[in-house]
Image (cartoon, rainbow, N blue to C red):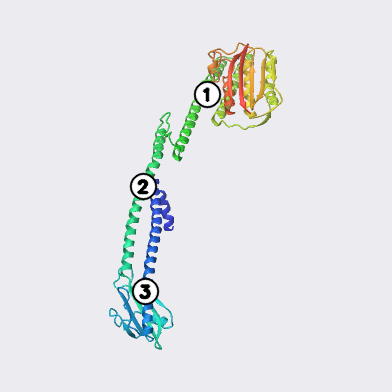
Amino acid sequence: MTPHGRLLPRLRRLPVVTRLVLAVALTMSLVLASAASFVYWRVRTALDQQLDDDLTTYRHSLDHALRTGTPLPPGPSGSLQQVLDARGRVLDSSRAICQHTLLTPAELGSAARGTTVRRDLGSLLPITPGTLRLQAHRVTAGGHRRIVIAAVRRGHRDEALRELLAQLALASGLTLIAASYVGYRTARGALRPVERYRTGAATLADSTQNLRLDVPTDRDDELTRLGHTLNHMLDRLQASAERERRFVADASHELRTPLTLIRAELDVALHRPRTTRELTETLRSVDTEVQRLIDLSNALLELEELGSTGHITRAPASLADLLDAAVTPLRPTAERAGRHLVVETTRVSVDIDARWLRPALSNLVDNALRHGEGTVRIAATVHEGVVSVCVTDEGPGFTPDFLPRAFDRFTRAETSRTSDGSGLGLAFAHAVATAHGGTAHAENAGNGAAVTLRLPC
């Protein structure tokens, strides 16, 4: 594995704050290095330009003096001069360099061919004494070719650049430290809510009830929205846990009665020999309770499925056909009881989930047949994008104490827990209406009970 490949996993294991500070430090280092390089380049260019201008002026004065045969003029402070013949012999030189030739053989050859030679002697770093910048140029004087070398000392220029480098390094270092500290404090402050959320989640993991994260209400940034999202998730988790608890409690409570009845019937049948007729009656009773168990289990599972997902799939459907599909299976039951089922609607298309609404309406009609009297009317209308379905009967209606809890699970108007029905019909209809974004309402209207579902369509 390459060093780069080994470094990335190590960086990912670092705390987020550390990685953010490292990112800030690296970014600031690049920015400061670029800025310092630009400043250094600009200052060095300006100093070199001034130095080159002085050196060129000095060389031109030497060339003029050599052509006119006048004495070589003194140059700027710290300047040097040297005159060579075509073979490189020193004809004239400043006292500081004496007979030491400033040009290499290759540079001497280039200058003899008419090329202007420019070179620096000594380095900026490490510090070198006697640093020079020179220019060498061929001059023809009195019919002879001469090579004139003009040089100026770079001491002041190099000292200024070294001081600039030191100041830039100091300023960059202090700026980097300050930026890293500010980045650290900013990252810690920004991630403090995340740590608070983590602590809250850990408390939730310890089975703390009704825990909600402390989210500020006076701001709207990414972390605040994260807090609201986590609180929404906690609400849904709590609701899911409550549904699960209720499902287990309801199932265990409601399944106990039919199971007890089945066990009692079987115990009685096995207690002593029974006739064929008695056994048949016992099996019919057991079959009735088993069917009740099946209906109750299916109702619980359907109610839990709808309540846990709240997912419906809307599709256009004929309202008249939907009501007919919900009522038709119950007509034989109504005829046997001498009751009438009347459907009042118009042929209009509605955008609903027929898979859930059809059994909900069947439950309402079945409840009216079980607990009401007289004619059962199913009236459906559509107005301003809302479909309203009202199921009424001509019975005694709901008792006053039943109405506030009519849509609770396993709630029955009768006091006996063994009465016909599971007490889930109204709860299921309410769940279907809620899943559609609508409402369910129970009341006593006229001479009977009325249950109304209103759904946006």
Q: Is residue 125 visible?
A: no
Q: Which residue is mark 3?
A: 55
Q: Which residue is mark 2?
A: 182
What percent of the width, then of the height, locates residue 189?
Answer: 38, 42
Tell me the CA gap for discs 2 and 1: 59 Å
The nearer-to-camera label among 2 and 1 is: 2
Task: Write down the quadrant of residue 194 in the picture.
Answer: top left
Query: Which of these two is toward me, 451 or 182?
Result: 182
What percent of the width, then of the height, locates residue 204?
Answer: 41, 33
Q: Is residue 282 above or below residue 104?
A: above
Task: Write down the quadrant of residue 329 in the picture.
Answer: top right
Q: Secondary structure at mark 3?
A: helix
Tell me the CA gap for discs 1 and 3: 103 Å
Q: Amino acid at mark 1?
A: Ala
Tell whether label 3 touches label 1 (CB within 8 Å).
no
Q: Is residue 158 visible?
A: yes
